[in-house]
Amino acid sequence: MTTIGATIPPLPLLARPEQHQQRTAIIDSEGEFTYGDLLQSSAQVAACLLDGADDLRESRVAFMTPPGFQYAAVQWGIWRGGGIAVPLNISHPRPELEHVINDSGAETIVAHPDFEARLRRIAEDLGLRFKLTSTALSAKETSLPHIDGQRPAMILYTSGTTGKPKGVVTTHHNIQSQVTSLISAWGWSAEDRILHVLPLHHVHGIVNVLCCSLWAGAVCEMLPMFNAESVWQSFIERELTLFMAVPTIYYRLIEAWEIASAERQKELSRGSARLRLMVSGSAALPVSILEKWRDITGHTLLERYGMTEGGMFLSNPLHGERKPGYVGTPLPGVEARLVDESGQVVEPGTPGEIQVRGSGVFLEYWNQPEATRSSFRDGWFKTGDIAVVEEGSYRILGRSNVDLIKTGGEKVFALEIEEVVRTHPSIRDCAVVGVEDPEWGESVSVALVLEKGCPITLDDLRAWAKERLAVAKVPKRMLVLNELPRNAMGKVSKPEVAQLFKQH
């Protein structure tokens, strides 16, 4: 039996595992680990970071580990020692890592030995304390501080559409609110078993999957990286109940299914059908992917909407109709509204900016008081996303500064155009942007990824689109790419797409 030598702080997320100590918490490439293992290992990490001090006093600790048990142990160790966790993106080059480390004011870097060569040099050059996980996980346990829920817990850096990413500060209470909202809405229990394939520097992988799993007393199986065959095989072999991913992952899984033999396809479909829930998020889910996935697995993907700044805000129902192209209604503990450019609430059916409030909304942007102030209006967080409510459900139209295109005096929304263009039989995927134009102000421009052996001209596309779209929404420019530029979460980088048009 695992013993716990340090006092557990009164934070529910960290204290709840006491009742599940002998249950499996995490399975990774190194083996199986119980909740007792997690409590003991995180206490050792905390002791190593404290190094004789009584409290880290909100010192920022940047860390990088592969997906797995050590990630959770380090993150919890930072929290239990009174620090602020700053997860690093394992795919980032040195300049981007340095931005996060410098901007957050991290005083310590913790690295798995796999990343020692990358991070030790940065720590030495910046004069920061450096710890290996192998050292931290062998430290002798000590007394740990009392952690109040209002203290900052984590800084996550937004991908951003312009400029350098901002650090989003969430408190322990914010994270607890985000987690309990999803536990309630999606029916999490200790009997659940989820497959984790998402990056762990993003709210989707950290909160929606890992934190919810550990709060519920469930099992989280973590793959070292996404691989379509490994995921399909897990659906077949493991007793999974939950899977959460981004649209790009579902697209890759569909591709793998399509090239499989007929017998193998039946096996894959049967395995995936056994899960109770599959969720898609972090980017708009094309209706074509939702429909194809439903055909293959029998699952209608549950699409939801959220942001780094507050976790999840809206969700389709666990039970009930999930409408393709819609992201549902406010989650428990979340208030949402749509407002026009003057801040007035709009009528149903009228597009407006999504504004939200609730206990899960973030504390501040790190060291950016003006950006923090400008992001709120009378206590409501301004998401910058445009949506419309139709038959009680929210439909996302796009980012106000990226997906709203003003062309010839009319306003059109990129996501609406993309959904139509994707239905063309020659087009596999697309991204629509507005490109500066002397005649139109902005011209509707579409970057295409074509099906193999299916060429298309701009004239062909325009003729086809005119039968399906209002004239202002018909693309005026077209660019064919091998693939669309995307960020780590699979979201298309619209600024990069726009830049490609300018280059051409």
Image (tube, rainbow, N blue to C red):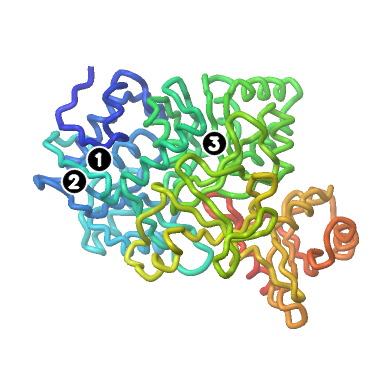
Q: In the rendered structure, which amino acid carries the disc numbered 2?
A: Leu
Q: Earlier in the sequence, mark 1 or mark 3?
A: 1
Q: Is residue 493 visible?
A: no
**In which quadrant of the rendered image does the N terminus lie?**
top left
Residue 431 vs residue 474: left or right?
A: left
Element class at badge 2: helix
| CB atoms of marks 2 and 3 within 8 Å | no
The C terminus lies in quadrant: bottom right
Q: For the image shown, how many numbered marks are present on the structure? A: 3
Quickly name the residue at label 1: 77
| Above or below for 108 versus 342 | above
- Which labelled disc corresponds to residue 257? none
Residue 49's disc is: 2
Indicate the position of residue 448 as horizontal and vertical percent values. 74, 57
**In the displayed structure, would residue 200 be above or below residue 354?**
above
According to the picture, the residue beneath numbered tag 3 turns out to be: 244
Image depth: mark 2 or mark 3 in front: 3
**For mark 2, does the 10 Å Cα neighbourhood hold few (<14), some (14 to 19), or many (20 or more) residues?**
many
Type of amino acid under label 1: Gly
Q: Disc 3 on helix, strand or loop? A: strand
Sequence-wise first label, 1 or 2: 2
Question: Is any atom of residue 47 visible in this view?
Answer: yes
Of callouts 2 and 3, the N-terminal one: 2
Q: Are marks 1 and 2 in contact (CB under 8 Å)?
A: yes
| Residue in view at x 27 percent, y 58 percent | 106
The residue sitting at 80% across, 68% down in the picture is: 472
